[in-house]
Image: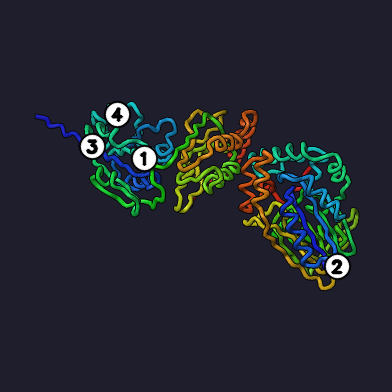
Amino acid sequence: MIIVIKKISMIIAVASPSGAGKTHWIHQQIAQTNESIGYFSPKTDFIPIDATYLQSEYPQLKIYQTGEEAALLAGSDQTITYIEIPWYLDLSGIEPLLTSLNSHRVAIISPDANNTEFTTWADEVVSGNQITKLTTSLQIHRGVLTGEILDFDSLATFWLEMTQGAYGEVVRAKGIFDLEDGQIYFGDFTANQPELEFKPLNLPRWLDGKPVRKSGFEIVGNNLKQAEIAQTVKDCCVPESAISYYQQQVKESLATEPEVELV
Amino acid sequence: MKIAVMSCIHGNYAALDAVLLDIDQQKAEKIYCLGDLVGYGPHPNAVVEQIRSLDIPTVQGCWDEDIVEGLNACDCSYPSLLAEKRGKTAHEWTNKQVNPEVREYLAQLPHTYKEDNLCFVHGSPSSNHEYLLPEMDAFVALERVLSSDADVLFCGHTHVPYVRTLDSGQLQVKVNQPNQDEQATVSFNTPLKRIINVGSVGEPRHGRPNATYVVYDTEIDAVSLREVEYDYQKTCAAILDAGLPPIFAWRLARGLEFAEKADDPTHVCER
């Protein structure tokens, strides 16, 4: 008789208020294991900022899209699959899926905030970033970029202005942007946390016309001046007529770069 | 004699008014202006009319030149696409606002003004687009002062005030002549020279909204960098009322300047 032992996969659902550190915590967990890992963040496919970031850090990570819940229910091939629940999703709305998956629930909470909803919901509570604003009073503004390439210095100016309050009070901002050097950059800001600089993600350079991959940003705060934000981001974009010129320059530069050999 | 030197007013009348009051309190006997009377700010005509009415010796700044000749700088003027977009918006607005007399006045301003051992320029003696930054190479800095044939070179354009003393200048020049084996060598020492950047009245970039200018005592060669508080919210409100981009007001209130800062400070505009 042959006994087939199917590896039991674990589903870990992670929830928190905006900016408490869900993606950061998941990143830490993945770093500590050699197991195969899956990741799913419902309702974020239009700008998969966190998924893109994690994928660049862990190329073997299996990303599930919205609509692939059935694959999770059937039992994924990954040993552990993290479900990152965006703060703006109603926990009761996703409850049927979590129940059917028999998931372990982790809440990342701010030490001083009112976290009753999350602590009641969770099997495990983890202390996260300090958050000063109640999630319920916040606006969210998303910008979906469709192949636009941004100028780095312009983006840096916009990001500084935006995070310092030029376009409304911002408590959280993150984005992925295609820049003129062909790389995709990740920006991450949480109020009262040390600001992270833009960093290029470990993904292939795009140097053949307008990028056909998802990019954009998500800004959370109060009194956001959405039209001004949209116009400023537009003003940061390289004109389509100049894209080919920039990309040719980068290609030539890369072709002449000496290879560095580590001894 | 105490003199006051100011620069880069950029259509900010409230800041100019406060600086003129402070100059009066400092008992400066004469005032000089290093240009950029217009651009970004909401009161270009009022600023020029005030400078004219006080008969202040003034040199032409890059923004004054652009209003007269049109935007024709090379790519050096803007550090980013966003800065370029904003600069052009400000230029177009200012260009529509300035009246013919103001334009005529800006057109006749000289690039340099010299009095005794003092020289007044906007950017550098070479170009009103060139940035004389405090950290620039000492040889280049010395060359710029020597080319002005002055002991003290007053400049603006960077919007950050500083004083740089160039002492013990020893120059050695070797000349290779055709058909001659020996090099002709000339050595000479230069007397002490100074570059004094007077900052900006109307568009500071030192992280505070306050206006800056300089008081210089010609008798004892003493420099005093002045920082003057003023009602910058009044200018911010005027920026919004004028329909200029709100981000100009936001940046002014934080002493962040608006845009212009070259990537390569030693680059001279090829216009």
Which residue bears the numbered disc 2? Answer: B188
Regarding mark 1 in the picture, which secondary structure is present there?
Answer: loop
Task: Between label 2 and label 1, give the one nearer the viewer.
Answer: 1
Where is the C terminus of chain B found, in terms of image quarters?
top right
Marks 4 and 1, the one that precedes in the sequence: 4
Q: Do callouts 2 and 4 mark residues in contact (Cβ within 8 Å)? A: no
Three-letter amino acid code at disc 3? Ser
Between marks 3 and 2, how big is the CA–CA gap?
82 Å
Circle 1 crowding by C-alpha within 10 Å: few under 14, some 14–19, many from 20: some
Q: How many marks?
A: 4
Q: Is residue A209 above or below residue B44?
A: above
Picture coordinates of residue B179 (x, y %)? 91, 54
Residue A190 visible within the image: yes
Q: Nearer the viewer, residue A246 or A26?
A: A26
Q: Nearer the viewer, mark 3 or mark 1?
A: 1
- Image quadrant for the N terminus of chain B? bottom right
Q: Which residue is mark 1?
A: A87
Image quarter of residue B105? top right
Q: Residues within 10 Å of mark 2 (few under 14, many from 20)?
A: few
Are discs 2 and 1 less than 8 Å apart at CB? no
> Which of the colour schemes (rainbow, by chain, secondary structure, one colour) is used?
rainbow
Foreground mark, 4 or 1? 1
Earlier sequence position, callout 4 versus callout 3: 3
Whether residue B71 is visible to the viewer of this picture, yes or no, is no
Marking on residue A69: 4
Q: Residue at x 34, y 54 (%)?
A: A112
Q: CA distance from mark 4 to mark 1?
A: 19 Å
Q: Horizontally, is B42 left or right of A148 in the view?
A: right
Tell if the residue under mark 2 belongs to the same chain as the one under mark 4: no
